Amino acid sequence: GNSVTQMEGPVTLSEEAFLTINCTYTATGYPSLFWYVQYPGEGLQLLLKATKADDKGSNKGFEATYRKETTSFHLEKGSVQVSDSAVYFCALRRKGGSYIPTFGRGTSLIVHP
Amino acid sequence: EAGVTQFPSHSVIEKGQTVTLRCDPISGHDNLYWYRRVMGKEIKFLLHFVKESKQDESGMPNNRFLAERTGGTYSTLKVQPAELEDSGVYFCASSQVQGNTGELFFGEGSRLTVL
């Protein structure tokens, strides 16, 4: 079946540090890939997505590239801010079938001033 | 435009009691999903409505869970009787279209604590 594996957190960084949160997936066919973010006290919201191999999703300084050969969709940001502190969820939606999104366990990011 | 709203935000009940969670999706969104996240683990799919019909309820853990969406608007998820392992955060999400590229819009979640 479909699954998403994320690196365990929390990830603790100083402001302006480089961020990478790893995400790999298992799915039949070629799914669409997503990163959602949950800020404290809020619901999940879409951060970025990529719908086919080699696509790069980007938003708010975050980027992730859909790598079919390594079945990965790692999230990166060149310089994190305190306001980026949140829980980040990697997710996939399979093409065909029920399209039910599958989520990872989430990675907590804590950014210190 | 109002987002997805969930009620209550937090519920504390004793084992054996009943709890009903409510979700109001974004107006016009036919697709409504329920998910659950147990502490630190992945967000797990429970079920999917298209309007008032259950499209997929393969993630419902057992028959103590009952979901309804009368009239295709808001949805309720009842847990009866609640067990300790039902504790977690229950998320509701809605979307306008099906398909694999669409975005889900989430509520803030209902945290359930079963003592």
Image (cartoon, rainbow, N blue to C red):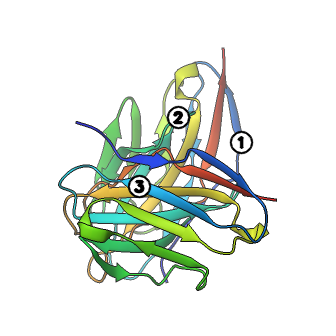
Q: How many marks?
A: 3
Which residue, given by chain and number where applicable, does mark 1 sit on? Answer: A10
The furthest residue to the front: B17
Q: Amino acid at mark 3?
A: Cys
Image x and y of residue A51, in percent:
27, 60
C-alpha span from label 3 to label 1: 30 Å
Q: Would you place residue B107 above or below residue B59 in this image?
A: above
Residue in the picture at 54% in, 69% down: B78
- The quadrant of the picture occupied by the C terminus of chain B is bottom right
Q: Amino acid at mark 1?
A: Pro
Closer-to-camera residue (A19/A109): A109
For the residue carrying disc 2, how many other residues have a C-alpha within 10 Å: few (<14), some (14-19), or many (20+)?
some
Residue in the picture at 58% in, 20% down: A82
Tell me where residue B102 sits by quadrant: bottom left
Tell me where residue A40 sits by quadrant: top right
Which residue, given by chain and number where applicable, does mark 2 sit on? Answer: A39
C-alpha span from label 1 to label 2: 14 Å
A42 left or right, relative to A56: right
For the residues labelled 2 and 3, say whether their Cβ atoms are less than 8 Å apart. Answer: no
The furthest residue to the top: A113
Which label is found at residue B52? Answer: none
C-alpha span from label 2 to label 3: 20 Å
Callout 3: helix, strand or loop? strand
